[in-house]
Amino acid sequence: MLSVLVPELSRRGVPFASTDAEAHRFLLFRAVSRLLDSREPARPVVLVMDDLQWAAAVAVQLLSHLLRDDERGQLMVLATARDTEPSEHLATLLTDLRREHRLDLVALRGLDARRTAALGAARGEGVRVAQLHETTEGNPFYIEELVRHVVELGGGTADQALTSLPDSVRDTIARRLLRLPASTRRVLGVAAVAGRGFRLDVVAHAAGIDIDSADDALDPAVSAGIVSDHGQPTGELRVHPALIHAVSRDGLGAARRARVHRHFGHALEELGGDPGEIARHLLAAAEDGSDVTPGIEMALLAAGEAEQRYIYDDAIAVLEPAWAAAVSAMTCQPTWCAGLRSRWASHSGAPGPTSRGPR
């Protein structure tokens, strides 16, 4: 009977034939159960199963039979499954097993910051891993792959690895994203341009859809544990982990990213947003060669507000990309050129390209 699964077990190599599909399935399940019988020979048996959330219905039925076959010796099944990728067949089985007291559930979480640092240090001597936990949220696979990638790049930080993810990580995340509906991936890609945290109303505006449609589109991502509002103000969401945010953002392509940045800048202007954030988006939008003036003017406004509150670090943070954009564009408009130069002069100790500027 087991030749159905393993033809080598049959001398003739001919599978068992039956016109009764249910009888055939029962005999197959019973044969597998007998194979795992701990009484012959007398020894404990552990069956390990991974990624049960992807198991086909018939595989879940086989597992159900194995766990309920009291005519066989003791059997321990150790199985893993993602609770963020629900399976109707598996959910039904787990509910029944809980009711029958045949199931012990152990929730697995990512490594904490200390264990993340320890694993990173063990896998890559000399790698600076201060940002590794935030980047990977403690996922051991991501930790090991990112550290290996950093080592191959010649050392550095996990943040530097985000600019060029290893193929192993990028492919794993891409496969996870492909299981989401196309509408979800589209809105998630737009949201990724905003950063790891984003406002739903702004994302909807930037995507050109109403807020209810954006909310509906992101529901599968919430169910998959990719997006959450845990610990965030009302209306704000967050992408987990940073690696998924990076892959979603990069999937848009440079030209489309620039357009989405422009949509975000205009959405924040209309809906009410921080001038520094608006400036960041408008300056990023100009990377496609369009006019840098809107971004620089907004950066000057944001820097002025920061200076009024004596938050000079914020002023520097918004002026530096504005200066870089002006240098890159090799332009200097009368409406903002003098203001940009004077602001840099007032922050002469700030890091940045102070030795040369736009002409």
Image (spheres, helix red, strand yellow):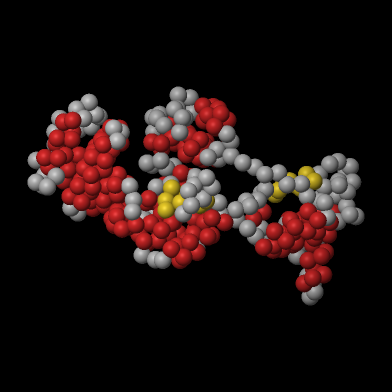
Name which residue lies at 74% across and 56% down. 94
Decide: is 188 above or below 321. Answer: below
Apparent side of residue 202 relative to residue 319 in the rendered image (left or right) = right
Taking depth in this image into account, of 311 and 70 the one nearest to the observer is 311
Decide: is 248 above or below 358. Answer: below
Name which residue lies at 80% across and 59% down. 65
State the image coordinates of residue 264 (x, y, percent, origin top left): 33, 55
Apparent side of residue 129 relative to residue 74 in the rendered image (left or right) = left
User: In which quadrant will I find the N terminus?
Assistant: bottom right
Name which residue lies at 11% across and 40% down. 338
Apparent side of residue 11 relative to residue 49 in the rendered image (left or right) = right
State the image coordinates of residue 233 (x, y, percent, origin top left): 48, 48
Decide: is 57 above or below 111. Answer: below
Please, which residue is most extreme toward the bottom here?
A: 19
State the image coordinates of residue 261 (x, y, percent, origin top left): 31, 53
Any part of residue 59 in sight: no
Please, which residue is most extreme toward the top here?
A: 126
Name which residue lies at 75% across and 57% down. 95
